[in-house]
């Protein structure tokens, strides 16, 4: 006798319910994570965001380990900045973007 999952036994509408419930739980944890960032210290809030994102990384990307390593490296780089604002405005890639924007606006 073939074993069937609970979702298969209960039909396609149950599968939709489970997916919807999982999406709701994911959204709820996302909202909680983002809401709690205002209470965390820099750069540990980047770690909180990465920890929330990790299960999705596994689900979405075949190269999840490489991408996870990139995010951890970003956290390490961020730890060299005193604040989120400084990280976003004073990092080398931000300076390159500002420089490129100025060159384009002169044309």
Image: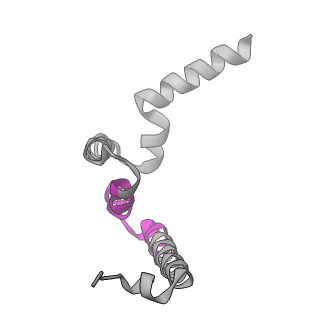
Residue 4 drawn above or below residue 65 = below
* Above-or-below relation of 86 to 97: below
Verify whether residue 55 appears in magenta.
Answer: yes
**In this rendering, position of residue 76 left or right of residue 31:** left
Residue 4 at x, y = what percent?
35, 82
Q: Residue at x 43, y 49 (%)?
A: 84
User: Residue reaching furthest bottom?
Assistant: 10
Measured as percent of width and height from the top left, residue 91 is found at 42, 33
**Snapshot quadrant of residue 8:** bottom left
Residue at 30% from the left image edge and 48% from the top image edge = 64
- In the rendered image, the quadrant that contains the N terminus is bottom left
Name which residue lies at 34% across and 62% down.
55
Looking at this view, name the residue that lies furthest to the top: 107
Give the left or right position of residue 20, taking residue 106 as reference.
left
Q: Is 105 rendered above or below residue 62? A: above
Q: Is residue 53 above or below residue 27?
A: above
User: Which residue ends up furthest to the front in the rendered image?
Assistant: 1
Front residue (pair 17, 10):
10
Percent coordinates x, y for residue 102 in the rendering: 64, 19
* Residue interval drawn in magenta: 31-58
Q: Report the magenta stretch's main SS.
A: helix
Image quarter in which the C terminus is found: top right
32 vs 9, nearest the viewer:
9
Q: Is residue 72 or residue 82 the one in the foreground?
A: 72
């Amino acid at each position: 006798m073939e074993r069937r999952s609970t979702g298969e036994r209960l039909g396609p509408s149950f599968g939709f319910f489970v997916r919807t419930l999982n999406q709701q739980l994911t959204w709820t944890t996302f909202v909680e994570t983002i809401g709690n960032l205002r209470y965390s210290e820099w750069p540990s809030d980047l770690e909180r965001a990465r920890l929330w994102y990790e299960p999705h990384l596994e689900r979405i990307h075949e190269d999840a380990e490489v991408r996870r390593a990139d995010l951890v490296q970003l956290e390490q780089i961020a730890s060299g900045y005193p604040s989120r604002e400084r990280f976003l405005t004073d990092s080398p890639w931000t300076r390159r973007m500002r420089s490129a924007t100025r060159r384009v606006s002169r044309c």
